[in-house]
């Protein structure tokens, strides 16, 4: 419903290229050029500077880009609200989650939600928490579940739960029988760490920093984006990792791993991240309600499984 010229201009501005915009919009490049030229003629000013390395926005182009994004977002919102009035609730639910949330929380949240809302198709992006938060702020995805509360005035953050973090070692390791482990005891060991930029990596580095150890002093063996992969390498004797209880409850069984509390205790929050001023279409509102209602029960089940696995390992 929005002006096609604005849609095309927004794509060119975002992608920095007429060619990439044409591919993204399934248009020919001359058609894209024509739409942008029409918009420049309408405002009687140049909006883009063409160069060998792509296009850049002029001062006027920056203004048009800002308003175009708002107009296009409102147009999408209008379409969604009208669709709700005239059709059965359904469609796509775009979620952004961190890797640890994907491992310890998301499958069980989706299990119940999909059973109740078969007409909704969740589309999940997994990545670093900061990157997912930015995509929520840019309205590329509907909401996020992650371990950080981004400092953005465009986002609303709601803490849903806390998940204790544990040091995870091979069961045969001498420290596996400890009741708790300090940063000083873990520092010399090879660390199966998470990717830099990952929220869980930041929490771990903060744990060591509070003990006076900077990131450069840590014995990083490898960096991974997956809790399951980290646990596998620990089971193979490659080092230790620090993992949330939710991931251990679901993937830590098998008799090869031991997990020990950290001293002082370290927890990973679980946050629901939403755009502050975006109208929430029906499937998004339904998922938010489902998450709020079911996170406590999933947390209790994770704790029960973790206790059971600990008792088997004793």
Image (spheres, grey):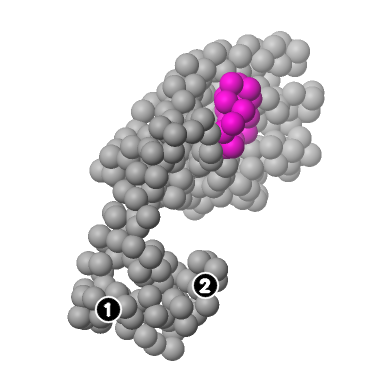
Q: Say which quadrant the C terminus sits in.
A: top right
Question: Looking at the image, which residue sits at the far bottom?
Answer: 52
Q: Which residue is disc 1 drawn over?
A: 40
User: Is 264 located above or below residue 47 in the figure?
Assistant: above
Element type at marker 1?
helix
Q: Which residues are magenta?
A: 102-122
Q: Quadrant of residue 304?
A: top right
- Tell me what residue is drawn at x 52 percent, y 72 percent: 27
Q: Is residue 177 visible?
A: yes
Q: Residue at x 21, y 75 (%)?
A: 43
User: In front: 27, or 135?
Assistant: 27
Q: Main secondary structure of the magenta part?
A: helix
Query: Which circle marks residue 27 in the picture?
Result: 2
Residue 297, magenta (yes or no): no
The quarter in which the N terminus is drawn is bottom left
Figure quadrant of residue 281: top left
Give coordinates of residue 181: x percent, y percent: 56, 26
Q: Up-down: is 24 above or below 112? A: below
């Amino acid at each position: 419903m929005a002006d096609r010229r604005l849609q095309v201009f927004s794509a060119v501005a975002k992608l920095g290229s007429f060619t990439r915009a044409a591919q993204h919009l399934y248009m020919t490049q001359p058609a894209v050029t024509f739409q942008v030229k029409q918009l420049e003629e309408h405002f009687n000013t140049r909006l883009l500077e063409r160069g060998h390395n792509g296009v850049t926005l002029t001062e006027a182009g920056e203004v048009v880009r800002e308003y175009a994004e708002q107009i296009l977002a409102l147009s999408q919102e209008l379409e969604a609200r009208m669709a709700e009035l005239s059709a059965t609730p359904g469609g796509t639910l775009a979620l952004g989650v961190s890797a640890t949330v994907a491992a310890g929380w998301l499958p069980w949240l989706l299990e119940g939600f999909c059973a109740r809302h078969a007409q909704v198709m969740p589309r999940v992006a997994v990545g670093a928490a900061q990157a997912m938060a930015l995509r929520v702020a840019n309205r590329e995805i509907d909401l996020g579940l992650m371990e950080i509360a981004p400092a953005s005035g465009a986002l609303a953050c709601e803490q849903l739960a806390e998940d204790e973090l544990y040091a995870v070692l091979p069961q045969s390791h001498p420290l596996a029988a400890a009741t708790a482990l300090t940063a000083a005891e873990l520092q010399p060991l090879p660390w199966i760490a998470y990717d830099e930029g990952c929220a869980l990596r930041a929490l771990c580095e903060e744990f060591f920093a509070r003990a006076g150890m900077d990131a450069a002093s840590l014995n990083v063996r490898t960096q991974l984006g997956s809790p399951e992969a980290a646990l596998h390498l620990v089971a193979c004797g490659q080092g230790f990792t620090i993992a949330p209880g939710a991931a251990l409850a679901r993937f830590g069984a098998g008799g090869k791993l031991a997990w020990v509390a950290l001293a002082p205790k370290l927890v990973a929050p679980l946050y629901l991240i939403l755009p502050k001023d975006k109208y929430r279409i029906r499937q998004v509102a339904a998922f938010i309600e489902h998450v709020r209602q079911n996170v406590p029960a999933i947390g209790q089940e994770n704790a029960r499984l973790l206790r059971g696995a600990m008792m088997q390992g004793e």
